C-alpha cells in the first residue's frame, strides 16, 4: 500500500527520473529508515541507484555513535554505499556564533552537497513527513508569515527531494514495524528545548485531543489549497510585473497604473521590484509596502527611505525605486566599444545593445538556482580579477562544465549549431586577470568557475536587450 502510494506521489510530483543517482540522508531515525527501505524496494521499478549519508553531530555522547553503528549495519545489510561525517556541532555553532539548529542545517547541507559533487549523485532524498509539515506551518504562523510560510516545506527544492512527505509519522512507524525494524530514538526530539519540539510534543497532541484528532491531515489539506491559490497569484504577479514594472540601468520603475490592481497583487509587485534592485527580498517588511502605497498618492517629487540605502520617489507617472546617490550599492551604467570591464559588485552595464546586470548573493543551504536563458551564476571567489566582456577572438577556448580539457569557441558554436551570422553577437565573459573564459552567453559555463560545495559567494549575471523585464 505505502509502496504504491509513494510511487504515485513521486510520479505526481515528478521527483525522480530514470537513472537518477539518489543520496538518502539517513540519520537512523524512524523517518529516514522508512525512506531508505521504501526507495530500496522501489529502486528497480524506478531504475535508480542509491547511496546513503549520515552525519554524527557528536551531540548525544555514546548514543551518537550507537546511531552511527545502526546506520552502518543497515546499509551493510542492504548493500548500500554509506558516507559518514563526524562534526562537533556545539563547537561549530560556538565558532560561528549561531544556534545549534542553524549549525546542524549548515553542516548537513554542506556535506550532502560535498558527497553529491564528488560521487555523482544528482539528487538527495530527505525524510520529511506530514507531521513535519504541520510543525513547520505552526512554527511559521506563530512567528508571523504570509501564504508562503503557510505552505510549510517544499516537496522539492533544487536537488533536494522529499518522497515521503505525504505520510504521517504513525504510518511510517507502522511500516517500519512491518519490516521488523524500528529505528533509533533521538532523545533531543523528546526534550522541550526547541520551539519545534514544543509544537510536536505539546501543542499538536493537545489540538488532536481537544479539537481535531485528524489535525495533521487537516493541515495537509489546507496546505494543498494554499499551494493552489499561491500558484495562481504568482502567475498573476508575473503577468502584471511584465506589464507595469520596468528595470532600468540604475533603478526600478513601477507604472502608477498598478495602483488599480488588487492589494494582494500590488503588495507582491512592490516586493518583487525592491527585490529586483537588491538581488534579494531580505528586510522587506509590511510597513515598507504600506509606505510605498501612501507615497504614490502624495505630491510629485516626494520620497521615502527604506532599509539598505534604498529610496522610493513619487514621479509623475511612476514610482521609482533606487539606491541613494551616495550608496555603495548604487548601480552605474558604462558603455564601451570593443570590450567592457565589469566590477564584481551590484552594477548595471550597457554593451553591444545589451544590458548586463550584476548582483552579489550568498549561497544558503537549500538555494534553488534556476539556470535560464539570459541568466548565469559564477563562484565569485574563484574570479581573480574583474570581469572582461567582449565578442569572440581568434584562438578563444573554454574548459566546459564537467570537462577537464579545453574546447575552442568555434567548436562550441559548431556543436551547438549556432549560425555563422549569430556568432559575432554572442558575449564572452573572461576573468580579466587570468584571461580564462568563464562563460559563453547562453551556452557554456567554465568548469573552473562553477558553483560547488565550497561556494560561499555567488555572482549572478543577467543579460537582456534594452530593458530587463522578468
Image: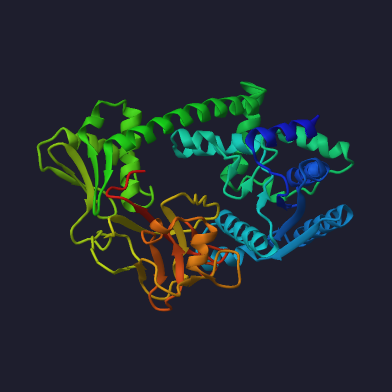
Residue 285 is at least partly visible in this image: no
Q: In the drawing, does residue 410 fall left or right of residue 29?
A: left
Q: In the drawing, does residue 79 fall left or right of residue 261?
A: right
Residue 185 vs residue 245, the one in the foreground: 245
Q: In the drawing, does residue 223 fall left or right of residue 217?
A: left
Residue 437 vs residue 327, the one in the foreground: 437
Q: How is the image coloured?
A: rainbow
Residue under the point 60% across and 57% down: 109
Tell me residue 250's x, y (percent): 24, 54
Residue under the point 23% across and 63% down: 335
Tell me residue 242's x, y (percent): 33, 37
Residue 268 is at least partly visible in this image: yes
Q: Locate the C terminus by quadrant.
A: top left
237 lies above or below 469: above
Return the residue found at the far top: 211
53 lies above or below 171: below
426 lies above or below 339: above
Q: Which quarter of the picture shows residue 129?
A: top right
Residue under the point 39% across and 30% down: 236
Tell me residue 228's x, y (percent): 51, 27
Return the residue found at the far front: 420
Return the residue found at the far bottom: 434
174 lies above or below 448: above
Residue under the point 70% across and 64% down: 85
Tell me residue 116's x, y (percent): 66, 59
Q: Locate the N terminus by quadrant.
A: top right
Residue 380 vs residue 292, the one in the foreground: 380
Amino acid at each position: 500500500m505505502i509502496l504504491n502510494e509513494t510511487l504515485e506521489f513521486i510520479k505526481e510530483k515528478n521527483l525522480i527520473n530514470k537513472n537518477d543517482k539518489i543520496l538518502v540522508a539517513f540519520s537512523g531515525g524512524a523517518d529516514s529508515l522508512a525512506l531508505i527501505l521504501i526507495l530500496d524496494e522501489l529502486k528497480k521499478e524506478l531504475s535508480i541507484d542509491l547511496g546513503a549519508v549520515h552525519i554524527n553531530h557528536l551531540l548525544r555522547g555514546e548514543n551518537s555513535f550507537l546511531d552511527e553503528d545502526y546506520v552502518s549495519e543497515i546499509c551493510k545489510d542492504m548493500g548500500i554505499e554509506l558516507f559518514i561525517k563526524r562534526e562537533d556541532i556545539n563547537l561549530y555553532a560556538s565558532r560561528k556564533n549561531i544556534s545549534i539548529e542553524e549549525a546542524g542545517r549548515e553542516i548537513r547541507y554542506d556535506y550532502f552537497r560535498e558527497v553529491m559533487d564528488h560521487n555523482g549523485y544528482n539528487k538527495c532524498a530527505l525524510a520529511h513527513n506530514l507531521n513535519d509539515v504541520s510543525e513547520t506551518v505552526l512554527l511559521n504562523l506563530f512567528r508571523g508569515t504570509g501564504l508562503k510560510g503557510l505552505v510549510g516545506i517544499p516537496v522539492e527544492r533544487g536537488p533536494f527531494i522529499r518522497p515521503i512527505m505525504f505520510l504521517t509519522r504513525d504510518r511510517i512507524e507502522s511500516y517500519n514495524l512491518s519490516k521488523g525494524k524500528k529505528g533509533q530514538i533521538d532523545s533531543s526530539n523528546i526534550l522541550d528545548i526547541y520551539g519545534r519540539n514544543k509544537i510536536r510534543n505539546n501543542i499538536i497532541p493537545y489540538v488532536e485531543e481537544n479539537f481535531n484528532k485528524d489535525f495533521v491531515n487537516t493541515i495537509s489539506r489546507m496546505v494543498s489549497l494554499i499551494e493552489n491559490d499561491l500558484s495562481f497569484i504568482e502567475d498573476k504577479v508575473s503577468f502584471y510585473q511584465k506589464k507595469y514594472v520596468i528595470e532600468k540601468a540604475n533603478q526600478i520603475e513601477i507604472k502608477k497604473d498598478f495602483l488599480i490592481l488588487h492589494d494582494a497583487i500590488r503588495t507582491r509587485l512592490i516586493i518583487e521590484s525592491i527585490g529586483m534592485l537588491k538581488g534579494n527580498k531580505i528586510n522587506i517588511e509590511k510597513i515598507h509596502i504600506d509606505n510605498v502605497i501612501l507615497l504614490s498618492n502624495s505630491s510629485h517629487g516626494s520620497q521615502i527611505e527604506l532599509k539598505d540605502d534604498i529610496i522610493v520617489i513619487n514621479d509623475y507617472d511612476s514610482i521609482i525605486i533606487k539606491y541613494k546617490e551616495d550608496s555603495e550599492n548604487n548601480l552605474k551604467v558604462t558603455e564601451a566599444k570593443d570590450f567592457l570591464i565589469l566590477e564584481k559588485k551590484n552594477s548595471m552595464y550597457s554593451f553591444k545593445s545589451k544590458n548586463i546586470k550584476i548582483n552579489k548573493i550568498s549561497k544558503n543551504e537549500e538555494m534553488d538556482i534556476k539556470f535560464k536563458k539570459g541568466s548565469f551564476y559564477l563562484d565569485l571567489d574563484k574570479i581573480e580579477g574583474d570581469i572582461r566582456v567582449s565578442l569572440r577572438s581568434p584562438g578563444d577556448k573554454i574548459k566546459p562544465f564537467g570537462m577537464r580539457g579545453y574546447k575552442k569557441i568555434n567548436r562550441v558554436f559548431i556543436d551547438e549549431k549556432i549560425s555563422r551570422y549569430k556568432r559575432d553577437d554572442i558575449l564572452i565573459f573572461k576573468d580579466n586577470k587570468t584571461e580564462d573564459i568563464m562563460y559563453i552567453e547562453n551556452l557554456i559555463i567554465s568548469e573552473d568557475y562553477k558553483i560547488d560545495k565550497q561556494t560561499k559567494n555567488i555572482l549572478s549575471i543577467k543579460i537582456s536587450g534594452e530593458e530587463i523585464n522578468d
